[in-house]
Amino acid sequence: MIGGKHVPKFSEGVIPVDLTGAVYLIKREVIEAGVRYGSHPIGEDAPFFEQAQQLGYELYVHTRLRPVHAYEEGVELVAKLAGR
């Protein structure tokens, strides 16, 4: 999300965002600062990102990486660039 809105089309590369879901990297210092998941109508990720932003952390998405769900049967856990 950017500006509280879902963005269906975006530029390629690393872009700043307000919220993302499910697959992301978190710096240890964010957890050590007390940022936690919580209950929210759009998902437990929302409070996590809100807290992180309130503490001054910036959020980014790398649009060329395509994540996979780790629990999907037969999925090889290797990050791959989109289109390759």
Image (tube, grey):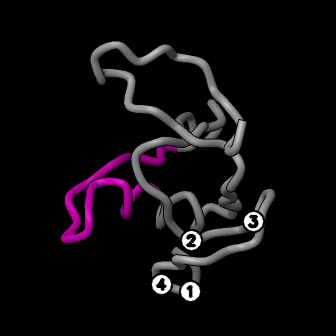
| Amino acid type, label 2 | Asp
Marks 4 and 1 close (CB-CB < 8 Å): yes
Location of residue 78 in the rendering, given as x and y in whole percent from the top left corner = 60, 19
| Amino acid type, label 4 | Gly
As helix, strand or loop, the secondary structure at mark 2 comes to loop
Task: Pick the residue in front: 47 or 9.
Answer: 9
Marks 2 and 1 close (CB-CB < 8 Å): yes
Q: Is residue 32 magenta?
A: no
Residue with the mark numbered 4: 4
- Magenta part of the protein: which range? 34-48
Residue at (47, 67) in percent of width and height = 50
| Secondary structure mainly formed by the magenta segment | loop
Q: What's the mark number on residue 15?
A: 3
| Amino acid type, label 3 | Ile
Q: Quadrant of residue 53?
A: bottom right
Task: Pick the residue in front: 1 or 32.
Answer: 1
